[in-house]
Amino acid sequence: MLNNIDGDNKMKISEVREMSIADLRDRIEIEKSNLDTMKINHAISPLEDTSKFRKTRQDIARMITVLAEKEKQQN
């Protein structure tokens, strides 16, 4: 599952749903950090594929949504 850290491919919802709550929290932080790094690198030298920004943001949103669902189920 962690093979997508570089942001090349979007994560499938089934992959996200298989992750534990702790894994989701960790992965969200990693992806947010990755997005910040990409933005900084893009400011210095433009990326060839700017769609990576959108894919990463969508992955983060997908993980946050599943995390909220799992936390709601726990309570």
Image (cartoon, rainbow, N blue to C red):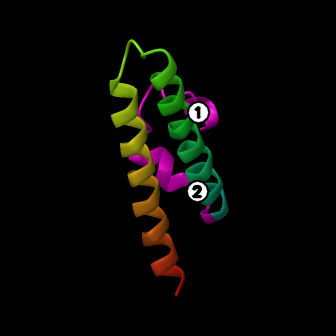
Q: Please, what is the three-letter code of the amino acid marked with disc 2?
A: Leu
Query: Is residue 12 in view?
Result: no
The image quadrant that residue 12 belongs to is top left
Query: Is residue 25 in view?
Result: yes
Check the image and report above or below for 17 versus 58: below
Of residues 36 and 20, the one drawn nearer to the viewer in this rendering? 36
Check the image and report above or below for 24 versus 15: below
- Residue 43 in percent (x, y) is at 46, 25
Check the image and report above or below for 65 versus 29: below
Q: Residue drawn at (56%, 27%), measured in percent from left and top?
A: 6
- Dot 2 crowding, Cα within 10 Å, few <14, some 14–19, many 20+: some
- Residue 9 in percent (x, y) is at 44, 27
- Residue 28 in percent (x, y) is at 55, 52
Q: Secondary structure at mark 1?
A: loop
- Residue 49 in percent (x, y) is at 37, 17
- Dot 1 crowding, Cα within 10 Å, few <14, some 14–19, many 20+: some
Of residues 35 and 10, the one drawn nearer to the viewer in this rendering? 35
Could you tell whether 5 is left or right of 8 in the image? right
Q: Is residue 61 magenta?
A: no
Q: Residue drawn at (52%, 87%), measured in percent from left and top?
A: 75
Q: Is residue 14 magenta?
A: yes
**Sequence-first disc among 1 and 2:** 1
Q: Residue drawn at (50%, 38%), measured in percent from left and top?
A: 35
Reading the image, the residue beneath label 2 is: 24
Q: Please, what is the three-letter code of the amino acid marked with disc 1?
A: Ile
Reading the image, the residue beneath label 1 is: 5
The region drawn magenta spans 1-21
